[in-house]
Each structure stands twice: as structure tokens, then as C-alpha cells.
């Protein structure tokens, strides 16, 4: 392949350019999630739509990335990647000028289309640019680059939001896109289109409809599952998934090759990718809300939580790549998932209105470490299943699951939190012999004051006293604790599945 005919000096710029392009897909939504309180106040975003706004771009990516893989295989992976980088610059500049919530949401949906090109093509190009025996090490460097940037960029974003305003946040990702564009244009070779495949538009549209209905239904479920606005979209989503499976089984050129799931390692790997992205997105969303509302942390401080230990995580991920190449992805996958469990349990055990910042730093570090170690093992497992000519298609399956998790993270975390928070303040009211109607009015008043107060003012103690003595700060943190405890079941279950189903020996690469 391409790198085999080049001098070794070009290998590093190739991996760096592709890693930058891939990292844009993480940094772009992360900037929004961590600074969502400021943006929602400025544009008066309805509270029940915060999760939708936070996951809008990744929702579109999850649906569109299946089409991107087929398009890249047929018409050129490099050309598609460069088009996505240019599109990311244009869309984010427009987002920075958003006059309203509706306009910003439209830009986030459009941004999802261009991010799909980046996330669906970057790893595919990595596979065809690096020999199979060096691929795990290249993936380790790829993920380490992502870690370094994801450690630095939240701090940069927080400083930007605090110093010059939230609109300038949307210029962070375009700067990375321009850097990736230069490296890609100069060093990355366009592989030959070995196989032209028809685009399964029906399958892609069914996936998009299913995901859109699922996220909308979960967002509406915050006000109760019994409402038609909640259960009708969920039923529609389930029916659409069934239609999608039937269509894919009969299609000559399916968007999702269902035969891939006959392999237990492949199935576990893509589910682990969904889980790690779900936890990463939910964690960043929770961190932004909890840090701003309860701990009264400014955006710059919240961003700095990602910085400590960045070099250590990057080094660990590079080491993981070497170990995966020498042994198998199994130990790394299990270890990464268990580190994610540790991160969620740490918050579940320690969250509180006066918790120490170093605990948040440690939880953030564990989340990043677990996510990237897991992603390294997942990427090698998935790419090893890609036959010649279908690299983009198979890589896009991994990213479709990952982006589905990333899109669902904010909405599901918010749904769980509202459920647990509701139970906590009701118990609080009963313990203080306060009527539920009066307690509900107090909760709504406090939420409204926080949603529309300038800056990250945190909980107003006078409002708490007016709330019939309710300890809403404790109720809030207890809701967060129970949410983290609930989501820890996912990585724990996947770690057990990986232990039982992943092979102990290397699978022969196709």
C-alpha cells in the first residue's frame, strides 16, 4: 500500500493529519457540551431540548456515516475527507453567527453531515496507509494525538468563552480542520477505488429516522413516558429498526453488512465503542452542568479539568497500541472498560456541593484513559475484519455505533438525572412535611433562576431557603450520583462479554 512505497519520514505526518481530522469530531461537540449552560442562557434554549442540542451533530453523524463509508470506498477516501474538513470550517463560522437557538440547531445538524465524512474516513485511510503489522502502533499514536488535543482544547475553549464570549468557541474546531487539511493534502495518498458500491439510501434514511425518533422520544420522556409525545417516537424508532434489519437482509448493497455481526469479537467491539462514546458524551455533559450549577465553576476551570494527566494518558495509549500489536486487543479492551467503570463509580461515591476539585480531575482523567484505551483495542478489532475494498464501509460501522452512543449520551444522562432528581426532592419534601405542589413550585423557581441567571452563579442560598427548606443542592448531587451508578452497568457488562467472547490469539488479517 501507500506507506510501503514511501520513506519512513512521511509516516508520522500521515498519521498526524488523520488524527487531527478525527479529533475534530470529538473536540467539536465537546466544546458545545462543556459550555452549554452559557450558550443555552444566551439563546434561551428550552431546558428539555438541551440534550437534543448537545447531541444534534453526533445524531446526524451516526446516521450518515454508513453512507460515508460506501461513498469513500467508491469515490475516494482522501477527497471525501478534505471535503469534510472544508465543510467543518464553513458550518462552524456560520454557527458562531447564530441569532437564535433554531439557527444554531440547524447548523449543528448540518455540521453532523461534514463530521460524518471525517469520522467515517479517518480510520479507513489509516488502515490503507499503514502496513497491518504496524497498524496497532499507528492506532496508538493516533489515539494519543487525540488525547493530547482533547486535554488541551477544553481549557482553551473555556478560556475563549470566558475572555471573548461563547461565539468564538465555534472557531476552535475550524483551526484544527485547517491544520488537518494541510497535512492531508500534502502527505496522504488517495488509495485506488477498488470496488464501486451502490449507495443504500433507503437504509441510511431508515437509520436516521430511527435515531431521530429515539432521541426525540427520550427528550420528551423527561416529562413522563405516558405522554404520546414520548412513547409514540419510541415506538416509531423500534418499528423503523425492524424495517431497517429486514431491508438490509434483502439488499444487494446494504449500508450495514449484517454478516459482520456473526463474529462475536466484532459485535463486542462495536458495542464497546457505543458504550465508551455514550459515557464520554454523558460525562462531559454532566460535568458542564454540575460544575456550572452546583460548584459555580467558571468555564475556564471546567475546561482545565481535562488537562492534568494528559501526557500520562497519551503515553498509556501509545503503550496500549504496542501491547495490542504484540498480544491481542482483549486485555486492553477489558482494562479500558473497567477504568470507565472506575470513573463513574468515583463520581457516584464522592459527588457533593463541596467536593474537592482534585476528585473531579481524577474522574475526568480516568474517563479519558478508559475511553482511549478501549478505543485503541476496538479500532484494531474492527479494522482487522475489513476485507479489501470495503475498508471505509467496515470502519463506518464502528463510527456509526460510536456516534450513536455520543448522540444518546446527553439525552439519556439528562433523562436519568431528571428521574432520580425528581425522586430525591419528593423524598426531601416528605421528610420536611412540605406539600408536593409547594415543593414543585420551589424546584421550578430555582431551575428557572439558574437557567436565566448571567454567568455560572450556582445555587442561590436565598432561593434554597425560599424553597421551604428543601436541600436542592444535595438533591441535585444525589441525582447525579444515582445516574453515574446506573450507567456504570454498561461498561461492566461489556467487560464481562469481552472476557468471555474475545479470542486469546490474534485473528489473521484479511
Image (cartoon, rainbow, N blue to C red):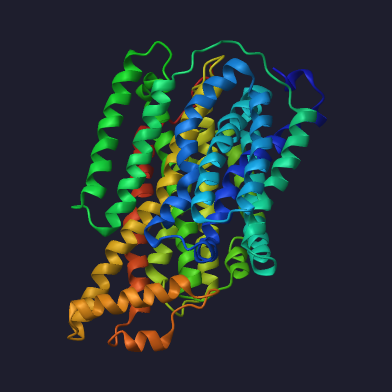
Q: From the viewer's perspective, tell me whether residue 294 is left or right of residue 475.
A: right
Q: Position of residue 390 (x, y in %)?
A: 53, 17
- Screen quadrant of the N terminus: top right
**Vertical comparison of 7 with 491: above or below:** above
Q: Position of residue 414 (x, y in %)?
A: 37, 58
Residue 276 visible from this viewpoint: no
Q: Nearer the viewer, residue 326 or 50?
A: 50
Q: Position of residue 394 (x, y in %)?
A: 50, 24
**Residue 264 image-quadrant placement:** top left
Q: Nearer the viewer, residue 390 or 337?
A: 390
Residue 84 visible from this viewpoint: yes
Q: How many numbered callouts?
A: 0
**Residue at horizontal 43 percent and vertical 13 percent from the top:** 253
Q: From the viewer's perspective, tell me whether residue 261 is left or right of residue 399.
A: left
Q: Nearer the viewer, residue 370 or 128?
A: 128
Q: Nearer the viewer, residue 413 or 350?
A: 413
**Residue at horizontal 45 percent and vertical 68 percent from the top:** 290
**Vertical comparison of 337 with 133: above or below:** below
Q: From the viewer's perspective, tell me whether residue 297 is left or right of residue 246.
A: right
**Vertical comparison of 151 with 392: above or below:** below
Q: Position of residue 413 (x, y in %)?
A: 37, 56
**Residue at horizontal 54 percent and vertical 53 percent from the top:** 368
Amino acid at each position: 500500500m501507500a506507506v510501503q512505497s514511501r520513506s519512513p519520514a512521511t509516516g508520522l505526518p500521515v498519521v498526524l493529519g488523520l488524527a487531527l481530522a478525527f479529533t475534530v469530531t470529538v473536540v467539536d461537540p465537546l466544546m458545545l457540551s462543556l459550555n452549554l449552560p452559557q450558550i443555552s442562557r444566551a439563546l434561551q434554549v428550552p431546558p428539555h431540548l438541551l440534550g437534543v442540542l448537545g447531541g444534534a451533530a453526533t445524531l446526524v453523524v451516526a446516521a450518515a456515516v454508513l453512507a460515508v463509508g460506501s461513498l469513500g470506498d467508491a469515490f475516494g477516501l482522501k477527497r471525501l475527507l478534505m471535503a469534510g474538513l472544508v465543510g467543518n470550517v464553513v458550518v462552524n463560522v456560520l454557527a458562531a453567527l447564530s441569532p437564535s437557538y433554531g439557527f444554531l440547531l440547524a447548523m449543528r445538524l448540518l455540521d453532523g453531515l461534514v463530521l460524518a465524512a471525517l469520522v467515517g474516513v479517518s480510520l479507513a485511510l489509516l488502515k490503507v496507509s499503514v502496513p497491518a503489522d504496524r497498524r496497532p502502533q499507528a492506532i496508538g499514536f493516533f489515539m494519543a494525538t487525540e488525547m493530547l488535543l482533547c486535554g488541551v482544547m477544553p481549557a482553551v475553549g473555556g478560556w475563549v468563552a470566558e475572555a471573548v464570549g461563547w461565539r468564538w468557541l465555534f472557531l476552535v474546531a475550524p483551526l484544527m480542520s485547517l491544520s488537518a487539511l494541510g497535512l492531508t493534502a500534502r502527505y496522504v495518498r488517495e488509495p485506488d477505488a477498488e470496488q464501486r458500491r451502490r449507495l443504500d439510501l433507503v437504509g441510511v434514511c431508515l437509520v436516521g429516522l430511527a435515531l431521530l425518533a429515539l432521541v426525540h422520544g427520550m427528550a420528551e420522556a423527561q416529562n413522563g413516558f405516558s405522554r404520546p409525545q414520548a412513547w409514540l417516537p419510541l415506538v416509531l424508532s423500534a418499528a423503523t429498526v425492524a424495517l431497517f434489519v429486514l431491508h438490509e437482509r434483502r439488499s444487494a448493497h446494504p449500508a450495514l453488512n449484517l454478516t459482520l455481526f456473526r463474529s462475536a469479537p466484532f459485535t463486542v467491539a462495536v458495542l464497546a465503542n457505543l458504550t465508551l462514546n455514550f459515557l464520554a458524551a454523558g460525562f462531559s455533559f454532566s460535568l458542564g452542568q454540575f460544575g456550572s450549577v452546583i460548584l459555580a465553576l467558571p468555564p475556564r476551570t471546567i475546561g482545565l479539568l481535562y488537562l492534568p494527566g494528559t501526557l500520562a494518558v497519551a503515553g498509556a495509549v501509545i503503550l496500549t497500541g504496542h501491547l495490542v500489536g504484540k498480544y491481542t486487543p482483549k486485555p486492553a479492551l477489558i482494562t479500558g472498560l473497567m477504568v470507565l467503570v472506575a470513573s463513574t463509580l468515583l463520581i457516584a461515591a464522592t459527588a457533593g456541593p463541596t467536593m474537592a476539585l482534585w476528585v473531579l480531575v481524577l474522574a475526568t482523567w480516568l474517563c479519558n484513559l478508559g475511553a482511549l484505551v478501549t478505543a485503541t483495542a476496538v479500532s484494531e478489532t474492527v479494522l482487522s475484519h475489513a476485507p479489501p475494498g470495503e475498508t471505509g464501509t467496515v470502519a463506518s460501522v464502528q463510527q456509526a455505533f460510536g456516534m450513536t452512543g455520543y448522540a444518546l449520551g446527553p439525552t439519556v444522562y439528562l433523562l436519568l438525572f431528571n428521574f432520580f432528581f425528581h425522586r430525591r426532592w419528593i423524598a426531601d419534601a416528605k421528610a420536611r412535611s412540605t406539600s408536593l405542589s409547594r415543593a414543585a413550585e420551589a424546584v421550578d423557581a430555582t431551575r428557572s433562576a439558574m437557567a436565566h441567571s448571567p454567568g455560572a452563579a450556582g445555587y442561590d442560598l436565598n432561593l434554597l431557603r425560599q424553597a421551604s427548606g428543601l436541600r436542592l443542592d444535595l438533591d441535585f448531587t444525589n441525582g447525579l450520583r444515582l445516574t453515574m451508578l446506573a450507567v456504570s452497568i454498561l461498561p461492566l457488562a461489556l467487560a464481562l462479554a469481552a472476557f468471555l467472547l474475545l479470542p486469546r490469539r490474534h485473528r489473521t488479517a484479511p
